[in-house]
Structure formats: C-alpha cells, structure tokens
Amino acid sequence: MGALLRGGDWSTSRLGPVDAWPQSLRTAVDLILGSPNPMCVLWGADLVQIYNDGFAAMAGAKHPDILGCPAHECWPDLFALIAPIHETVRQGEARSRKSQKLIVERHGGPEDAWFDLTYSPLRNEAGAVAGILVTAFESTAEYQAIRARKGAEDQLENVRGSYRLTVRAGRLGTFVWHVPTDRFVANATFCDLFNLDPEQMERGVPLSVVTAAIHPADWSAVNAAIQEAMRTGDDYEVEYRVFGRGGEQRWVLVRGACELDANGRPRRFPGAVADITDRKRAEAALQAQAVAEKTRHIDAERQHLRRLFAQAPGFIAILDGPQHVIELVNDAYYQAVGRRDIIGKPVREALPEIEGQGYLELLDQVYASGEPFVGHGVRVLLQRQPGGPPAEVFQDIVYQPITGPDGRVSGIFVQGHDVTARKAAESSQSLLMREVDHRAKNVLAVVQAVMRLTKAETVDGFIEAVERRVGALARTHQLLARHRWTGLALREVIREELAPYLGGEASGRLRMAGPELTVAADTVQAVGMVLHELATNASKYGALSHPQGRVEVGWSRSGDGAARIDWREVDGPPVSPPGRTGFGTRLITATAAGQLGGSAAFAWEPAGLHCTVVVAADRLIHREPASAPQPAKAAAAPATGLDGSQVLVVEDDAVLAMVTQDALEALGCTVIGPATTVDEALRLVAAEPELDFAILDVNVQGRQSFPIADILSLRQVPFLFATGYGKDIASGRAAPVLEKPFTPRQLEQAARALLLKS
C-alpha cells in the first residue's frame, strides 16, 4: 500500500498532491501503513478514505477502487449505520461497534467475517477534528465461538427441560433398600439403567448385585456417599456412570435419603434415579467448546508475541542455563551472526569467534550474580557472512538475567542494536572536525608565510601583493569547497586563477589546450599558487602587461602518468632573464619540487616567458588533503644559542618549508632539507649522523612522519612536531608540538626549549 500511495497521482483527488498534505495527515498515514491490523484514515469534510494492507484485504473486490474516495461512496450499504457514528466522532468523541459483519475475499472466494471497529477523532495542527481513524480487529473466531456456546447452552436447556418433563411424567427409576436384611428392590426403569433382571428385582437382591453395574472409577465416591448418608441420615445425591443394556455406558443422577430407627441405626434407604446422559454430553460439548475457545485465544496471543519477537527492531536472544544454550532468537539476531545454525547450542560453540573478547565472561558474571549488564557502543568481532572473516561491529547490548519461581537465575535475555553505522558517523565527524581544524590552521600558516616573504618597495605595493596571493588561496579553497574537496579539473583551476588578470576566456587573451585532467584536492592549492605567481609576473612584466599580449597554457600526460604544463606568453614586450631570483621564482621552483612532486623550468625567450611545470602522477589521484602549504628561506643572522646546530626540517608545503628554513638560518642553524617526503627524510637521517634536532610536519603528502620520529628517538635526537592538527597528534610520543601557524619567535622559543630539555 505504501508504494501504491506514493506512486499514485493525488493531485486531482479531493486531498490534493501528497506534498501539500498537512503534517497531521501524513503522520496518521505513516501510522496505519506501519500497523499489521486493518486501519483506515477518513479525512476532510468528505471523509476521503486512505487505508493500509490489512484494510485492503477487508475491502476485498472493492480495493483499490475505493482508495481516495469518500466513505459514503465506498460503503453505501453500511453508511446508514455508520453515518451517526461519524458525526459523533467529528464532535471529538470516540466510538466503537462490535461484531460488524463484512464479506471479505480470501481463501479463493468471498466469505463472511466479523470485526470489532473503533472510531477515533484525528486532529489537525490547529487542534480541530479533521478526520477519523478507523481500526478493525477481526472477531470472527470469537463470534463463532459465542454462537457455538449459545447453541450448546440451548441444547443443555432442552435436556434439562426434558428431564423436568420426565420427572413430571414419572419416568424415573425408583428403589428401596432394606438395610437390615440387605434386600434391594427397584422398578423396571431402574433395572433398565443398571442392566438388571426385573423379575429377580421384584423378589429383591443384595446391594452388591446393584453396585456391580457402577463404573469402577466412580465406585469409591459412591460408596463414601452411601456410608455418609447411613451414618447421618442426611439426603443422598450423587452422579456416576453405570453400564446399562448391551454394556452401554450411561450417566445417572441418584437422589435418596436413609431412614434411621430410634437407635440411629439405618433402617430403610429409598430413592430415585434419572438418566442424565444427554445432559452430561451437552455439558461436555460446552466445556470442549470453552476449552477450544481458550486454546484459540492462547494460540493467537502466542502467535502475536512471536510476531512481536520476530519483528523487534533490535536483535533478541534467550539463553538457557549456565552454558548459555541458545534457545530462541529473532530474525535480527540471525542476521547479525550470519544466519548460522545456532539454536540448541551453547554460545561458546555457536559463536566461537567471541572467545577471548570478554563476552563469555560477562554472561557468566550476569548468570552468577543476577545483576544485568548494559553496554553502549561495545566492540565485538562477529562472523557476518557464512565462512567469512570476523568483522568489526559495534553494539548497544543488555544482558538481563531471567529468574524462575524460586528466584534463581535460569537464563539470560539478550537484547541490543547494531550501532556500527552510528559509531562510524561519530568517528567520521570527529575526523572531519580535526581535518577542518587542521586545514584552517594551515591556511593561516600559509597566509602568515606569504605576508612574511612578500617584498615590496612601498606599503601599497606590499598590500596589493599580499591581497593578490591571499586571493589566489581563497579562490582555490572556494573551488574545492564547491566540489566537496574531491579534486578539480586543471582547466577550471587555470580559468579561476587567471580570471582577475584578463576578464575571462572571452577576452581572447587566454588559450587552453589539453586532455581532461583532474588535480587531487590536496594539490590544487599548490597548482593555484604556481599559476598565480606566473600570472602576476605576466601582468607586471610579461604578456599580460601589454594590450595585445596573451597567455597560452597547454598540458599533456607522459608515459609514467605525470602531467606536463606549458605556460607560454605571446605578443608581449621583449623579456630577458632577471638579474636575481625573486620570491615568485623561488616559490614556483620549491612548490613544483615539493608539493607537486615534479619540477619547474624557466626559458626567458625574446617572444615571452616559457615555463614548464611537471606534476607527479600521484598528485593527480584524489586522497585526503595533506598538510597545508608554506615556507621560504632567509639570510644568515646574528649568532644565537642555536648557532651551528644541524636541523632536519620535514615539511611538504613549499611556502612553509621556505619560512621555516629562513627562520632557522637567521638563528645560525644549518638546515638539512627541507625534506618534502617521508622517504627523503629517512634518507637524510641515515646520511647525516650529526643531527642536533629536527622539526617534523605530521602529515607529509598523505603519510605520517612517525617512522622518522621513531628513528630519531632511537638515536636520541630531540625533535618537535609542527602541525595544524593540535597537541594530541603525537600518538603517545614524548615530543613537544608547535601548532601552526607559528611565528619565527615561537619557532625559536620551541627550538631552545627542545635543546634545553634534551
């Protein structure tokens, strides 16, 4: 029904499209669709009908034509009966109707069925009654049982009436027992019931001849009643079975009284007997009907409980005895353990992979102590597929002891939920928060480094240069954010970085050519910085400084997967090699060699600059962003307490590496590196036996620098981590953390403290 409701076109119905339904109606519809009982919602002034699968079965051949139709059109033959109920419920009062007969289609054809119906008001967001919730509970079995019981009661009453007529007509067996002489006489009716000879009975027989016809199972009670009457003289009444003519077993009711003489001795015992076989059979039939009705009720309750057990949203198991034998599980539990054959087996045998994980010990503890165990997000390795390896699963679990009538623990009720997805989401959220923090700090570190390394002759020139470089960083971050940090097409990066200098491709000053090429997310910023520096230089001294000048950017892939980017400036002013290496050239060269894993070459041709940048193949494959960018070099400085120190610098961001190197050299240190990969750093450590200390970025092009830290620890070389991840990134290693962004003064203080501590 859910698919039928969602797939149907309701726009032309009285209720309008589903998206326009009020929330109160949507909630009511969700409620009935999730119920196994027949349920129906009547909504609006016309009482438009929406129902679930159970109600569809009740509707029989009327379904699906009555879906979305007013109630008075759906049930014209019943509407005269239910219309007053509808009006009452619309006033806010609930109503019910018992044993409503309906004709339903099932078992291959129409059949009569009876239902108990309840009608409850449904209110809208304003609190007014806007509809009616109809719930149906089938009562066919109860209705038929009541009819059968009524028939049995009527039959019993007929028997009782016949008995009364029999008494009035004198059709009773009569007897007299003369106790002192043990002479028993009776009429023909009595003889017929007890299979006795009437002629012999006229002369009289001993009581033992009569009692021989009594059913052996009843004789003890009959004899006790006779003895009590003879002792007290009270009335005697007893029902028992006898074997009559042809050995037929009959039920009789015998009433009488023992007459006592003056001395209290039994003298005479007269009485009467009636055949009550028909009454007994009617009573037995009524009792059997009652038992059958109760059995059906119990079976229905048991099936209902089993359905609830099987359909429970979490996994459930019942374990028996101290060995925790699996007695009963629901489908969710079967699914959790790979649908293995586990019923009747101890947990240790059924789930051998949990041995050594502590759960068997927990079950033993709960069984022994009678105290429940509650665990949240606990980790367990479970075999989820037949024959497959154990998988890591996280669960919320409850072990609840089951106690018997004597108060002793007899088993354990296991209930829980698989929260693996929730734990993964929490872990991802934590990782995302740390990554956001890391990226933010690295961006600040890059901005700080750009400001420190930018040179200009005037304040305005300095501000313009910084703004341009920070703007380049901002543009690449906006692009990455728009693409959810999944990498960017090289064409898009080029277009975005050059747009401020030439007004877009439409100006004709930019020509691009090359195959589809995607730059990894953690490499985009470096490519953007290289393009920005080239574009800035072109706008000041090259092709973009001339009205007719243009830039041609082409790219291709080499056999090893690396990308070659060719930057050519055309129709600009004549150019010549610069007299000194400026910041832009240093930044491009260092970035290409470090973050891009390739190289940069400059050809100052008369027609214009030709720059070739090679990007390694692994920088074109998406992976999580590595550490942020930065550094530059400085000149020698006055002597400090760090003079002459050999310092290993590991930093994959070219700008940050340059800033760190310049700051350390200004303090009189000799920088080993900077190393831009873990492998390069390990080679430098092996080749340089006289290291005084080291500064390590944590995330170096997607690899952690902890192997370098471990080797330095073995050689007793002090080191610190310089990172944007925060102070808890050291993974238990006793090393200080210098958080990015940092100033040269903070670097100096951290280095001095490191050497002082060592």
Image (cartoon, rainbow, N blue to C red):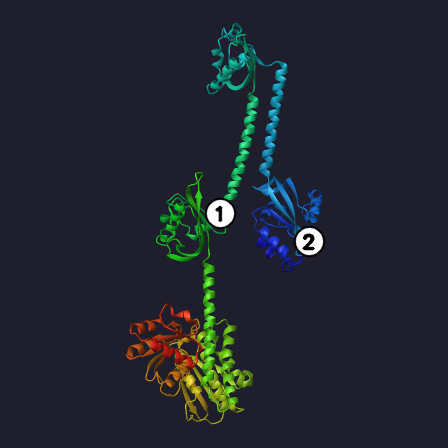
Q: Residue at x 44, y 44 (%)?
A: 402
Mark 2 — residue?
Answer: 128
Front position in the image: 141 or 692:
692
Marks 2 and 1, how far apart at CA: 38 Å
Mark 1 — residue?
Answer: 310
Secondary structure under the numbered disc 2 in the rendered image: loop
Judge the density around disc 1: few (<14), some (14-19), many (≥20) Cα neighbours within 10 Å.
some
Q: Can residue 572 be seen in this view?
A: yes
Q: In this view, does 587 lie above or below 736?
A: below
Under mark 2, the amino acid is Ala
Please tell me the numbered disc located at residue 47.
none
Q: In this view, does 404 lie to the left or right of 104?
A: left
The quarter in which the C terminus is drawn is: bottom left
Judge the density around disc 2: few (<14), some (14-19), many (≥20) Cα neighbours within 10 Å.
few
Front position in the image: 366 or 422:
366
Q: In this view, does 197 lie to the left or right of 560?
A: right
Q: Is residue 722 left or right of residue 252?
A: left
The image position of residue 12, as x and y in percent, is 67, 58
Secondary structure under the numbered disc 1 in the rendered image: helix
Front position in the image: 310 or 662:
662
The image position of residue 181, as x and y in percent, is 49, 6
Q: Looking at the image, is mark 2 or mark 1 earlier in the sequence?
A: 2
Q: Which residue is drawn at 65% across and 41% down?
A: 97
Q: Is residue 563 visible?
A: no
Q: Is residue 392 above or below residue 161?
A: below
